[in-house]
Amino acid sequence: MNVRLITSFGFAVLRLSTPLVFAALSAAICEKAGLFNMAAESMMLWGALIGVIVSGATHSALIGFLAAMAAGAVTGMLIWVATVKGKADLMLAQIAINLASSGGTIFLLFALTGEKSNSAVAIKSLALPKINIPGISAIPVVGKILSGQNILTYGAVVAAIVLSIFVFKSKTGHHIRAVGENPHAAESVGISVPKVYFLAWTIAGVLGGIGGAFMSMGYLTSFTKDMVAGRGYIGLCASSMVGGSPIGAMLCALIFGVADAVSNQLQLTNAPADLVLMMPYIVTIVVLVLLSVVKHGRATRKVKAKS
Amino acid sequence: MEALKMEHITKIYPNGFVANKDISFTVQQGEIHALVGENGAGKTTLMKVLFGMEQPQEGSIYVNEKKVNIKSPLEAISLGVGMVHQHFMLLPSMTVAQNVTLGMEPKKNGLVDAEKAIAMTQEMSDKYQFGLDARARVADLSVGLMQKVEILKALIRGAKVLILDEPTAVLTPQETRELFEQLKLLRDNGHSLIFISHKLEEVMELCNNVTVLRHGYCNGTHPIEELDAAKISRLMVGRDVVLKIEKDDPKPDKPVLEVKDLVCVNSEGKNAVDGVSFTIRSGEVVGIAGVEGNGQSFLSDAISGMIHYDSGSVKLNGQEVGGMKIKEIRQAGMSVIPEDRMTVGCVNDLSVRSNAIADRYDKKENMSGIFLNGKKQKEITEEMIKEFEISCDSQDEAIRFLSGGNIQKVVVAREFTSGANFVIANQPTRGVDVGTAEMIRKYLVRMTREKGIGSLLISADLNEVLEVSDRLFVMRQGKIVAAFPKANVVDVDVLGEYMLGIKTMTAEEMEGLL
Amino acid sequence: MNNAKKIETWFDLFRILVAVLLAYVIALIILGIISDDPLYVIGQFITGPFSTFRRFGNILTTMIPIMFTGVCMCFVYAINKFNLVGEGAVNLGGCLSACVAIALSDKVPAWLLLIIVLVVGALAGMACSLIPALADQLFHADVCVVSLMMNYILLYITSYILKYRIKDPGSSITASYKWASSLKLGNLIPGTSVHFGFLIAIACVVIAAILFYKMSFGYRMRVVGMNPVFAKYIGMPVMATIILAQVIGGAFAGIGGTVQVIGMFQSYQWTSLTGYGFDGLMIAVLARKNPAFVPLSAFLIAYIRTGADIVSRTTDIPPEFVSIIQGIIIVLVAAEMFLSRFKSKLIFNSAKKALAQKEGKA
């Protein structure tokens, strides 16, 4: 019994962490460019919906997945247009986009299928495959946790590593970090700040889109309204815990995944579901506050130490 | 060979301010050319024009005797013109090599070739004996080394003409000496350097030719052999028109502000204000002259409560200011005309009235019960408009629509009518038209004579500080380095020598004057 | 006033109108594309809200809750903090008011109970708003993220209270016990669903406008929002003002929840967020942070919403498409560059004209 509980819990942690990791990576690339990504929420929502629609239409999970990425990217580009080209306030623009996406996805679903909250009946969408890892699946407990996850769960790890290499080792990654740290310095050596922002928003969009695809083509197998439910914000929180480092953001997302899994597990007990569902959000606030305290404390200490 | 020539450069800003008027100067290959001038003389604008950050209305630029058109910093860089900004353009979290090669990183297999970047940087650093470790993180470097990273950045991009904007302002004497050796090495390697500085002994030591700017005009280029520090100071610091303000002798009474051993530490850990003591009495204007950035702003902010000072004491009418809220300081009798009227002195989008009554809207006599008294506010504002001849269409007009002079009049009117007996006037007439400036100065003097207020005047305008002040201090590197009992008899040349560090008074000389 | 100033002053209004119009047109195009009978749907959307007296009443009824949240967001927006907890404050205000109403029904007179529940709503809203405000000011945690998280927490708290504490087992839907019918806000305009909450909302707008423009706190708040450095320099308590503004805003949102619950229902039934908070943000943006313009902006939003409701009832199109319009309006109004080229052209032309006139005279 106990072993089974541990395996199923561990399995759930990884499963539930997956969308959070993508959201965190989406926020991380923006954070590295000095941007505050509150719109991972929208990117995921569009990714989830478009993934379902396209995979249903083409009978190909892969094409659906690619479409989800594209949908996320377009969302990111829209934010870029509004804030860089239109000089709209970044916060206000993202709030607006989140608002429009929440309604827009429902509306698009309806326009195509006549359904208003769930695509399950109307669209025969495909799920992304689960993967058994030959060697590992044989190991007791650990194998059961690590193997048999959705391909995107492994994809999340790969994405974090690739993003980390991209940010820290590639030329473009250098430029993104330069802009994030000091746009004037970057500009003074000929790096175009708007271009870097465009790139950051697009990559963030792609990552968000993948996270969304996992939600509707892995975690569930259909789109339901507002299914992202604040995961974008939780990812943002995870990323800011580690200053936007991709690997760190992934690990922090795991913490929130644990909170999610605990809350899922408790739902099976007699505990009131609503109070249990609250947990990940409370954890987010507490972590965010603690983190800001630490960060701020460090900054003031630094100034003091220098003097 | 002429490495660089700027000819008849005229730059007028959209607001009509003439920053450069018909300036010409030539930099030879392999020389260090000093560009000196007071604050606002036009040095920065001229260099911005050269570096492609501003476009001049008239004039032409030649690099290597070829006429060029520089439209952006990038074009300047590609022409071999590099600039070391006063505020470093660095990325602290990255390594020296990453900073130096930013934007031109060598690549291998699609990724940045970190080893090659390090090798390139190290080679360049060694060649000019910069003593940098290419792998070190910039955040861990001293300010002096950071500056060398900046210079390397320019050199690795092939800069032949290097602009150094007050490079020694942030350095210790040792670092400065080291920098000079390296700059001379660069010169001997055929680079041309433009050295912007206020420190005349440095100019004398380092430079071959000196071009002096004054009030936007060029005051000639002189070979260093023909000059000495006093001569440069006279060329730089001059009064084109001597301003005269009629005033009676002050009758200083009881002290209103007593500053003792005040120390303020800036974010770099340096003492921006370094043990300053003085007393201001009612009925007098005490002026502080000095090159900007020598601690005057910190002094003003510390006294007015905008920043906390690190040690010493500031007493306003006998009350210690440290630990008081700004509101309490104001209630205790202080008014402040801030240096930057647009970001500190007013709220752009609010009306003239809302700006005028900002310090007294909640006084009992200006409220009707729990409500704001609009009628009273209108009266107060109307009075200010009349007395200070503020030109505006109506009180309800947003203040940003007013001219700079009129905005300043609103600020001055508010601060002078607050009932305070001590006023800090920090650059009260900067960027203001002549008429308004004269009015503000006269008003300041009149208030001290008639109302017996004490005032601290901080100004980069020598005319102003000499004529308006009764006593005069000179501030340099956070310290008071000279004190004069009667400002309007101080010789400008002598003043310049104290400001620029050619001379310093001893404590005994200043005894009784502070 | 010279021409450039005039243009600047009027241009804001013009820009908002164009933004709304543009968003509206986009909505029409979308409606036209997806419906089988575009003319009918569009007709319903545009003229539907005015077609009957009852429907016109629906506009006013829809205005009620969003006037409260609009006022709330005016306070929050005035000090430039995106504290979006108004959304959750509506739920908590409504829910706690419902608890009190159920507990005290028939025990105290209706007028007293009304006052009590309004106070409870206000306090609930203040508490909601205080948490993100403190997290921001004391700990430098981002107020926007904290408030969004708060909204989920508040939703689950209220839904817990509803399901586990005050649920009426006899009811076929998830609903609380009923409170005394005497508490339900009376009808204001016969033949419509407009209730007395409308007057309470207008009263709140008036109070907010007075607070904004006639009292020292409002003045301080506007100064802090526009230039905190100036506020510090002139001696205003910047942090206290920022926190207090958010708390007052929260109070209005909480009252909004109360009024909506006791005005529309006789039991508490919300199991999801209402969206009124986000409507409030848009209203505040449209009203340019001025509470006096809240009723006008709220009318506009309510008109669009009512149109969408009618469309959704007659044709099955979900009313959520309104949020697309909202998003577009917010972005367009917030985007400085939107129509800015047109503005500079206007100013340039008028300057040229003025110059020509001058020369002509000379």
Image: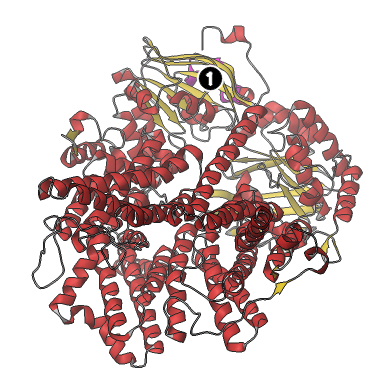
Would residue C203 be found to the left or right of residue B281 on screen?
A: left
Give percent across and percent down for residue C63: 23, 65
Q: Give the magenta range.
A: B483-496
Give percent across and percent down for residue A61: 65, 81
From this view, report whether residue B300 is shown above or below residue C232: above
From this view, report whether residue B183 is shown above or below residue A106: above
Whether residue C255 can be seen here: no
Residue placed farthest to the left in the image?
A: C190
Would residue B290 be found to the left or right of residue A158 on screen?
A: left
User: Between residues A72 and A44, which one lies in front from this camera angle?
Assistant: A44
User: Between residues B450 and C94, which one lies in front from this camera angle?
Assistant: C94
Q: For residue B492: magenta?
A: yes
Residue placed farthest to the front in the image?
A: A1
User: Between residues B148 and A233, which one lies in front from this camera angle?
Assistant: A233
**Of helix, strand and loop, which one carries label 1?**
strand
Residue ID for mark 1: B473
Q: Chain letter of disc 1?
A: B
Give percent across and percent down for residue B198: 66, 33
Which picture quadrant has residue C21? Answer: bottom left
Would residue B134 be found to the left or right of residue C113 on screen?
A: right
Q: For residue B214: magenta?
A: no
Residue type at mark 1 is Phe
Who's the residue at 58% across and 50% down the image? B21
Give percent across and percent down for residue C72: 31, 52
Who's the residue at 72% across and 56% down the image? A189
What crowding class fits label 1: few (fewer than 14 Cα within 10 Å), some (14-19), or many (20 or more)?
many
Whether residue B487 can be seen here: yes
